[in-house]
Structure formats: C-alpha cells, structure tokens
Amino acid sequence: MNPATINLINQPLLVMEAASLRLGRHHFGPYTLTLHAGERVAVLGPSGAGKSTLLKLASRELHHSGGHISLLGRDIRHYSLREMSRRRAVLAQTTHVAFGMQTELVVSLGRAALEIDPHLTTIVHNAMQLAHAAHLAGRKMDQLSGGEQARIHLARIFAQLWDIEQGLVMMDEPLAALDPGLQGELLDSMQSYAEARGHALLAILHDINQALHAFDRLLLVNNGQLESQVKADLHALPALQSLYGIHLGSLMTPDGQAVVYRKKNAAPTARPQAHSHLNS
Ligand SMILES: Nc1ncnc2c1ncn2[C@@H]1O[C@H](COP(=O)(O)OP(=O)(O)OP(=O)(O)O)[C@@H](O)[C@H]1O
C-alpha cells in the first residue's frame, strides 16, 4: 500500500469518553482520549499504573462500566467479534500458545475471522518478513526463544490488519523481549506498516527514548488515571519526571537526535505511589 494513496478519514478512530471500570478493589478511569487514523501514541507510566487496563478497555477485552467508548463513531459494544477483529489488532503483554504449533499457523490465526482468504499464504509470509521472523518458518512455537516467539506474535498482528486501511493496532510492551538492535528494527517495521495503511498505533512502552523518537503523542497513566497527554518531544520531560519520580536530563547526539537519561545523583523527586488511590 502506498501511504500517499490513503485519504485519512476525519472521523476519530477511537474515542474514550470518561471510560471507567472497577476490578476488585481497584478503580480505573475516567479515561478520556481521542485517537485518529495514522497517529502513533505511546502509553507510559509506572508499573501497576493501569496502562494494560486502559488498553484492555480500548480493545474491549474488558468492558467499561461507566462512560462511553466508540470505534469509528460506533459504540464498541455493538461490534461483532468478527468486525472487531477486522478493525483492531491487539498484541497482549503475554500470549500463551498451547502445544507446539507451527509458526505460520500462529501468524495465520490473526486472520481466523475471514471465511475466504485467498492471499493468506502470501500475507503470512510477508508479515513474517516484516517482523524479522521469516527464518522461523517451519519451526514449532515451543522450541523458540522468548524473543523469537515475540516476533511471531508481532507477525500475527501485522497479518491481521495487513490488507485493510485505518485500523487500530494496540501493543502491550511489544519490544520487551528483544535485543536493542531488533528493538530498533521492529520499531521501524511497526512505523512503516502503520504508515502504509493509515493505521493508528497505541503502544505501551517502558523506554522513554523509544516513545519520544517513534511516537507523536504520549499518554501518561498513573494511579489508574490518565494523568496527562503530551506531545512526544523534550517538552514532555517535566511531566515524565513527575510521572516516574525521577530526574531526567537530555543530550543531543552528533546527528541531532535528543537522548533522555536518568540523572543519577539528583535528589529523587517524590515517587508516585503506584495505585495508592486505586483502592478507593
Ligand atoms: N482483573 C483484575 N482484578 C483485580 N486487580 C487487577 C486486575 N487486573 C489488574 N489489576 C490490578 O490493577 C493494577 C493495574 O494493572 P495494569 O495491568 O493495568 O498495570 P500496568 O500499568 O499495565 O502495569 P505493568 O507496567 O506492570 O504491566 C495492578 O495493581 C493490578 O494488580
């Protein structure tokens, strides 16, 4: 697909209006945000802050009890499972595959909602190539390393929305199991994949530099709430410092790229208590 040929729709792809829910003693939300086709948005926050829960609400894995969530202007509760699977793809933090399934079969599961899929083999192959996993064809999942399995699951997500435009791709720590070289290459793959199709990317990350370099906007989540939304540039540093309770500095590399680092000797800022008021 050629990005130049995609007419991005004006209507927002995802709208969350004061969406909330309670899980046990924890209250999440209200989450209010709008995501447009073609946007790349990173979700950041301390461990246990409610990032995965936000993603699970947006993907309908969890059902909101308050507020409203819509996909392309339609209440997500009114989509059939098949319609949802052709509009949004979700890479969960951990995915367990039973038995020693073959890699191509796992990738093809991304397209299981389609009754007729004449280009399945080509799409599976291309998706594996884009996820740097083509060399894993023919292997069994239970004989792969964690990083290799992660690439197969990424290929599954690529395959799912390979042939549609303006979908929503949600990923929960997609790069966590990968070495630094592969992280960079797969970030590039995600960007080119989304850009070519006008897909929006909503990804939970723990790496501030990746979020600043590869994304347009940051959603800062803390204590089960969306604390703020900021542009992904160095102006976000004060908000990030307060989010994580650390001091951050930045350096400019010779090729003009800003790199953020944690200042070791600075007095710590008050570290936010993860979900201290989730238990209300
Ligand atoms: N089904 C559930 N029932 C009760 N509590 C839950 C449930 N799911 C998550 N929680 C709690 O809600 C809090 C937020 O969880 P969530 O997975 O959204 O955090 P997170 O920000 O994604 O964390 P991490 O970065 O560690 O993955 C955690 O304290 C977690 O234990």
Image (cartoon, grey):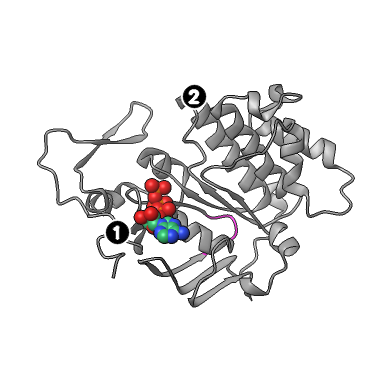
**Residue 92, horizontal then vertical, whole percent:** 55, 47
The residue nearer to you, when weighing 188 against 110, is 110
Judging by the rendered image, the residue that carries numbered circle 2 is 181
- The image's mark for residue 24 is none
Q: Is residue 189 left or right of residue 117?
A: left
User: Which residue lies at the image location 54% right of the left edge and 48% below the top edge?
Assistant: 171
Asked whether the viewer can see residue 231, the reply is: no
- The image's mark for residue 275 is 1
Amino acid type at circle 2 is Gly
User: Which residue lies at the image location 70% right of the left edge and 57% below the top edge?
Assistant: 85
Label 2 vs label 1, nearer the camera: 1
**217 above or below 76?**
above
Q: Which residue lies most toward the left here?
A: 267
Amino acid type at circle 1 is His
Indicate the quadrant where residue 29 lies: bottom left
Q: Is residue 63 magenta?
A: no
Q: Is mark 1 within 8 Å of ligand 1?
A: yes
Mark 2 and mark 1 lie on one chain; the one further toward the N terminus is 2
Q: In terms of image quarters, where does ligand 1 lie? A: bottom left
Q: Is mark 2 within 8 Å of ligand 1?
A: no
**Residue 186, horizontal then vertical, whole percent:** 56, 33
Q: Which residues are magenta?
A: 35-39
